[in-house]
Amino acid sequence: MSEIMRPIPFPELINWIRTEYKNHGSVFGVRKFAAKISAPIGPAAGPHSQLAPNILAAYLAGARFIELKTVQTMDGEELRKAIARPCINAIDEGYNVEWSTELTVAEAREEYVKAWFLCHIFSKEFDLADLAGNGCGDVIFNMSAGYSLDGIKSEKINAYIEGMKNAGNTEIWKSCYDYLAANIVSFERFSRLDLDTISPVVSNGITLSTLHGCPREEIEKIASYLIGEKRLHTYIKCNPTLLGYATARKLLDEMGYSYISFDDHHFKDDLHFNDAVPMLKRLQTQARRQGLDFGVKITNTFPVEIKRNELPGKEMYMSGRALFPLSINVAKKLSEAFNGELPISYSGGVDYFNLKDILETGIKPVTAATTLLKPGGYQRLTQLAGLAEKIISPCPIINVKKLNALCDSLPKQARYRKEYRQATTRKPQPPIPIFNCYKAPCMDDGCPIHQNIPEYLAAIAAGNNDDAFRIIAKDNTAPSITGTICDHQCQRKCTRVDYEDPLSIRSAKLCAAENAQEAFIASLTAPGLKTGKSAAIIGAGPAGIAAAVFLRRNGVPVTVYEKREKPFGLVQYVIPSFRISDEAITRDFQIAQKLGVEFLFNQPEDYSFAELQKKHSFVVLATGAWKEAGIPFSAPTSYSSLHTYFDSLAFLEDSKKTNCALELGKKIAVIGGGDVAMDCARAAKQNKGVESVSIVYRRTREFMPSQYEEQELALADGVEIKELLAPETWKDGVLTCEVMRLGDYDSSGRRGIEGTGEKIELRFDAVIGATGARVDTEAFARNGIKLNAKNFPEVNASRESSVQDVYIAGDCKAGAATVVKAIADGKAAAADILRKLGLDADFSVEPANTGSSPAGTDFAALYLKKGIISEAKYNKAGGFDNTECERCLSCNVLCEICTDVCPNRANVAIELPPDSGLRGFQILHIDRMCNECGNCAAFCPHAGKPYKDKLTIFSNEEDFVDSENPGILKTGADKYKIRLEDKSIVNYRKGDKNIGDTWVSVIETVEARYRYLVQ
Ligand SMILES: Cc1cc2nc3c(=O)[nH]c(=O)nc-3n(C[C@H](O)[C@H](O)[C@H](O)COP(=O)(O)OP(=O)(O)OC[C@H]3O[C@@H](n4cnc5c(N)ncnc54)[C@H](O)[C@@H]3O)c2cc1C
Ligand code: SF4
Ligand code: SF4
Ligand code: SF4
């Protein structure tokens, strides 16, 4: 079955590594090798140290301390069956439900011995080791074992330990050795002497894994046994439970992880700090006497409850950035107790941003897992190793002062706070195509108007704002407005969210607009008309103007009827000037004017289709959502209170019109938690005489629908957020609210709210309701447009209403939305009208980025960027730094996220020849290396799962039969069994015509250049 990992025989591994390197310059997907380093970093015991290829990949990328995946008596099939799948979720802070090796313990040892040979061979072959003398290895393997004294003393684990302490007499050692001796001439640098100098001591150090049922009273006995009888350098894994429940809860809450749920039972059951200190002192003395190293490994993991469907089951183990505050505080607590004289091996949220601080305290080695599970994968180790290499740590004492300072700085370290990662799911609906799957999530799912983001970022990076602006203006009819206030969902989808910071796409657009829009406008002329059939647009908001520009630019005569005197609707009249300038609005309007759109302002608002259709063949209704929201109180308000109650749009419009000269009083409340509420609060603050503004919201800030940055701006303006208050009445200056509390998690993982019954009374001078504007659909109904159950007009995908040739676009289609969605609607309507007229459209309606590999793409440069953390670049003078755009990974040209993030190297990219009918690189899934951990599915920017949906290479009949994946099993020379996309199975022999050309191309390419995949 596909969750079974099948170790690859040593000779096959050697062949794979050499052929991949020779043909493609990579080894198990690692392209940049770290040479001449000795940094004490590497993968933590976990998915990256389970199989021999994983360990070699880590080593080549820069790991020099490998903490091998834990072994215990429960192993192989028994353990595999106990692990739910998927078992890893590393989308943000990491979670897993796996714990020790899924191989048998004997197989695990074989993998580690094979890996030991591989690291030594290829350190020499690739000239990586920084060693004097004849040695060829510069890596330390550290064992990890658990979880009970009996288990560790068992024959199985004892044989493992002895076999690692001296592998020379093991079968696997002999077979690797014999193979290498027989083939030594085939290596370029690795010599017989090198082979003979490989130490059979694969590991003489062990880390005792605790938790996972390890009885606390046995920890000392096990460690004492490992030191005394096994004579191993010994470390004990300590857990965040040493902090005590209250401290752990407080640390997580402070950092914004209040949704992470756990009770105190592990804290009661696990080792207590007061017992830990004397125990560790006793063991330290014992180890010292025997001349062995002793210390602690901080931390193991942190068990928490599964509440938001993160993974299957009830309990999971937390890792990543949420574990960092806990782990580093455990390190501090123990270091204080030992005056820094207790050596600490560290993992627990290690990443590029904290590695230096950690190492500078004297803590080492440092191991990582979660950061390696994110895009960039193993290759992230190269940068980490380079960073670690430069740090001279004050060995062997830990600098307690520095450690304290690091812990104290945590609440201010924004990157470790939950809210830093402002991304929703990056997995939209379209399934993964079996071929040609690469895509840029920013432009595809992020941007409703599918702007070619990577292309304009590249132009800006090259300093070519004119080209960039042309690319932007092709799909965007309000570049300055969107460059300023777009809610930039593209940035939430950007692949770099999973590295460090998303690309500043919106600012890049504004940079292009500020530098190139005026010249662009000057160059515009109205294009000739291509049809006599005209379109009427009702409403000159963003949606109406978009429809008008796209139509007029492609030769259709257009008239826009607007009831007010100026263009751009809400943006013009309601959105405060401190958010959008008049110049930006004017600049965007000039594009439409220069293209020849006819605008009629101050028009009567009671339009009629009958009249319009006398003059125009098509009508686009884009009248927005301006109707007052319902009053946000459950009880009726008094007459006098109504005079101090304002609806958001009316308030903002008056405030803008009067330049913030409204007389509202001193204390203002804004009810609501969306972006409009933030604007109301900030605008209210600017009106004269206002002393305080409070946003009253029934949930907590964590659940506010407004953008995080808008909340921050409101807070920076001095606005207060009053959480968990549901307003009930507003009477005579008193807002009565029910105090709410967060309820349990619902099936979607969101926390509900429930009333406590407690009421509080708050005094205000005025209340502004910002709970959502509504659409006035009266005119729609009057003109015969069918409305749906929600009282919105019925429309098809092209936004055409139930009345033929009448389209609905923007906020009036389904309620208040955003400028860019309004443009998308205008674009869809225009595209359909052009189609009906038989005219070409010069803009894209569909994302146009799947799998293209333009000629001349510098793949080597793109691959190099993939492993590198590169923080957002800001121009200190306030302008835009165009080198920011160089951070773009060009995901439309090179994705391969699934290959990066797979700890087991079970997804590979192969390059097809240009005549294959397929574009550039294609992904193959290697069944025998995959354990269905699910990590590739978590990060693939398509809805599906690469490990299920991509063309799979099988290595045996049993696994082929057990799987449903489309794929190939080689059954003989030039013979294959194939499951096609429609699940039909065919036997194919070279030259047969029973499979498509694309499949033939894949098979021929694999045989010609990637044969190691089917050996
Ligand atoms: C306070 C506030 C802040 C916002 N902030 C953002 C933001 O930061 N980013 C963002 O992307 N979006 C924001 N939005 C939303 C955004 O402004 C709207 O989604 C967008 O303006 C919708 O465009 P539209 O063309 O559909 O409607 P509108 O902008 O409402 O334009 C409709 C136009 O139709 C005209 N009209 C109405 N009826 C008739 C009629 N019968 N005849 C002729 N003309 C008529 C109106 O006068 C108006 O000019 C915000 C909205 C508000 C209220
Ligand atoms: S890295 Fe570039 S191409 Fe990839 S999602 Fe971000 S902006 Fe788009
Ligand atoms: S292919 Fe995907 S599911 Fe399989 S091991 Fe790799 S990341 Fe996990
Ligand atoms: S993650 Fe893999 S399967 Fe998904 S789009 Fe990227 S290359 Fe294709």
Image: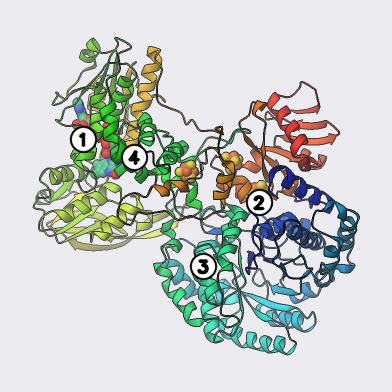
Q: Which numbered dot is residue 512?
A: 4
Label 3 lies in ligand 3 vicinity (Cβ under 8 Å): no
SS for tag 3?
helix
Alpha-carbon distance for marks 2 and 3? 27 Å
Mark before the other along the chain sequence, 4 or 2: 2
Q: Are marks 1 and 4 in contact (CB under 8 Å)?
A: no
- Callout 4 crowding tier (Cα within 10 Å): few <14, some 14–19, many ≥20: many
Residue tagged by mark 2?
Answer: 30
Mark before the other along the chain sequence, 1 or 4: 4
- Callout 2 crowding tier (Cα within 10 Å): few <14, some 14–19, many ≥20: many
Alpha-carbon distance for marks 4 and 2? 36 Å
Q: Nearer the viewer, residue 414 or 866?
A: 866
- Residue 727, quarter of picture: bottom left
Mark before the other along the chain sequence, 1 or 2: 2
Vertical placement of residue 425 versus 997, above or below = below
Which amino acid lies under the numbered mark 3 shown in the image of this protein?
Phe
Which amino acid lies under the numbered mark 1 shown in the image of this protein?
Thr
Q: Which numbered dot is residue 586?
A: 1
Q: Which numbered dot is residue 324?
A: 3
- Callout 3 crowding tier (Cα within 10 Å): few <14, some 14–19, many ≥20: many
Label 2 lies in ligand 3 vicinity (Cβ under 8 Å): no
Which x, y percent locates residue 156? 83, 68
Which x, y percent locates residue 278? 61, 88
Of tags 3 and 4, the one toward the viewer is 4
SS for tag 4?
helix
Q: Nearer the viewer, residue 122 or 504?
A: 122
Q: Are marks 1 and 3 in contact (CB under 8 Å)?
A: no
Alpha-carbon distance for marks 1 and 4? 16 Å
Residue at the spot x=87%, y=57% of the render? 180
Which quadrant of the figure contains the C terminus? top right
